[in-house]
Image (cartoon, helix red, strand yellow):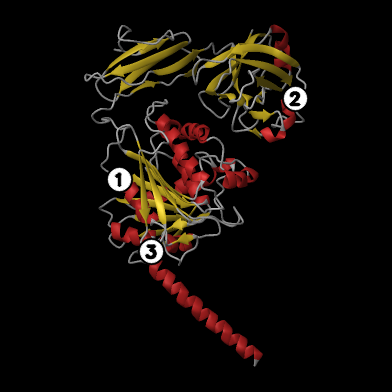
Amino acid sequence: MIQTKNMLKVIRSLIIIGIFHLLITSTVFGEGTFTSHSYGGKTYKLYVPSSYHTSEPVSLVVMLHGCTQDANQFAAGTEMNTIAERESFIVLYPEQTSSANSSRCWNWFETGHQARGSGEPAVIAGMVQQVKNNFAIDSDNVFVTGLSAGGAMSVIMGATYPDVFSAIGVAAGLEYKAATNSIQAFTAMSSGGPNPKTQGTLAYNAMGQYKQVMPTIVFHGTSDYTVQPINGDQVISQWAKTNDLAYGGVENTYINDTPNQTKQGQVSGGRSYTNYIYQDKYGITILEKYLVNGMGHAWSGGSTQGSYTDPNGPNASELMWQFFMQERGEQDPNEDDPGEGAPPMTTASPNGGTYTSPVSVTLQTNREAKTYYTVDGTTPDENSPVYSEPIFIENSSTLRFYSVDSNGLSEELRSEDYMITEAANEVILSSIAQEDGFVGRFSADGLSTSILKVGDKGMYNTDTYRTILSFDTSSLSSTHTLKGAKLRVYRKALQGNVQTMDVDMKVNAFGTSSSLESIDYSSAATYSNLLTAQVPSQDHQFVDFELPSHVLKEIASNNKLQFRIKSATTASFTSNVLEIHGGEHADYAPQLIVIKD
């Protein structure tokens, strides 16, 4: 009898589950097809609308689910397939595996998944390419969005594959590299990540040669206690910084994180919200944020058939699609004709850097304009040479230039540093990014391998932060006599007043290993206060520390060297912080330049 009752319970449960499955399926599938595929060891689901035809390229929206979710749940909850059926676009739902993350979270907080060509970003980009190979996709209309961990990964995709995605959406997500390990991840989720302006520069650097303005729309709930609302603010600030740099490669007030418009809204029978609109200097909406009052950790709008949704909020799926489509037909400032009122843009090819032979530099404008330049580091004006043919740079030089069009519109001054070295006798070693970083005086002052800074935290403290640079010198033969060596560092940003930098040198490592440790701040150096130099006057400029002759033997006869950079700032209420570029930067990495006999 008991067995019979149990069997009836099982049957009833199976019937209920089957009915529930049919309900979900009817919503998810719509009138198109919803099929499973695989790439790179992960599965993905693909919704293709019934109107799709190979003769007409369509848009593609990539949807990255949150932790504990899968493609079916995310599709059901966001109802993006319903919109895709109506608007005729394809939807791609990558799925995280439980073997990669026990909670099925995208690993946005691990360094192995934060760069182009590696980890999960490479797999997601590969899925997009596979879909492009099999379907007619409009490459100018590929977008990515996600919830929570998926939102954080959407930010990473925008930074690492700007040539693939034309805009991104972020629901309850975090800024680029908000964390680089699981401990930092929980800290960022609860109180925000690092300075978003710093992370904005990191995201710009991650774009590399594919840099372009990345329109971004953000949704966040005021009652989200899983990923606090400060993270939504930081996503906007980070992308404002990134996009400002992406527009021409320099900070040029193209856009900032102060909204141009603020609107109040109310969902009928649901939640109120504030809509923030951020426009570029030409009046084009580049960033947008919806702050939903009383909403927790959820996708705004959507259906309860999925998980982590709030149907009482504004419909994020509809609003994201509208935002994505706004980019169609609008003026992209990076295109050849920026529109009336936009100054010309000039690029140098090749870019500044270190070269072992003279270079011929071409200056190219995006439309007809006159380009003025200098190669001696001075600021060009209308009395300076006018570019007419490639500029031959034989010795190390700073090339500065700007262009003016026929309407008198002038672009911001641009600068490129070209270092011409002797290949036969000079060896250039870049610092080891994984071992670079800053250490604070006290444990509460922190340490980080993603930020390099010196100076103080304010409140009348001094010498709060010191930077450690690590170099592998094993490639230098002890049989060679060194004629000279210098340490080169590039200024990244300056806040407050930091005038000089002092350098300590350590054979091998300051701490117990070459990895960054708190004790690196005060550990004994092989040579203390070895050198002092002035801080460069502008961001991305370098300063050289000429190493004295008595340390050259140490450089040649050891496999590892570390330098500790510090600054004796004047105590004040406000902070004084100098940031320098780290070893991860291709153009501005710290360098140990060794001259062999």
Q: Say if mark 1 contacts mark 3, CB within 8 Å.
A: no
Residue type at mark 3: give it. Gly
Disc 3 secondary structure class: loop
Residue 449 x, y percent position in the rendering: 62, 33
**x%, y% of residue 553?**
73, 12
Q: So how many labels did they put on this image?
A: 3
Local packing at callout 3 (Cα closer than 10 Å; few below 14, some 14-19, many 20+) is: few
Q: Which residue is mark 3?
A: 269
Q: Amino acid at mark 1?
A: Gln
Query: Residue at the spot x=65%, y=30% of the render?
Result: 435
Q: Is 346 left, or right, of 357 in this rendering?
A: left
Residue picked out by circle 1: 326
Q: Residue furthest left?
A: 406
- Mark 3 vs 2: CB contact within 8 A: no
Residue 91 is tagged as none
181 above or below 32?
above
In this rendered view, identify the residue nearer to me: 141 or 540.
540
Q: Nearer the viewer, residue 134 or 367?
A: 367
Label whose residue precedes the other's in the sequence (2 or 1):
1
- How packed mark 1 is, by other alpha carbons closer than 10 Å (few <14, some 14-19, many 20 or more), is some
Q: Nearer the viewer, mark 1 or mark 3?
A: 3
Where on the picture, by quarter, is residue 571? top right
Neighbour class for label 2 at 10 Å: few (<14), some, many (≥20)?
A: some
- Identify the residue under disc 2: 522
Q: Closer to the camera: disc 3 or disc 2? A: 3
Element under disc 2: loop
In percent of width and height, residue 248 lies at 38, 27
Q: Amino acid at mark 2?
A: Ser
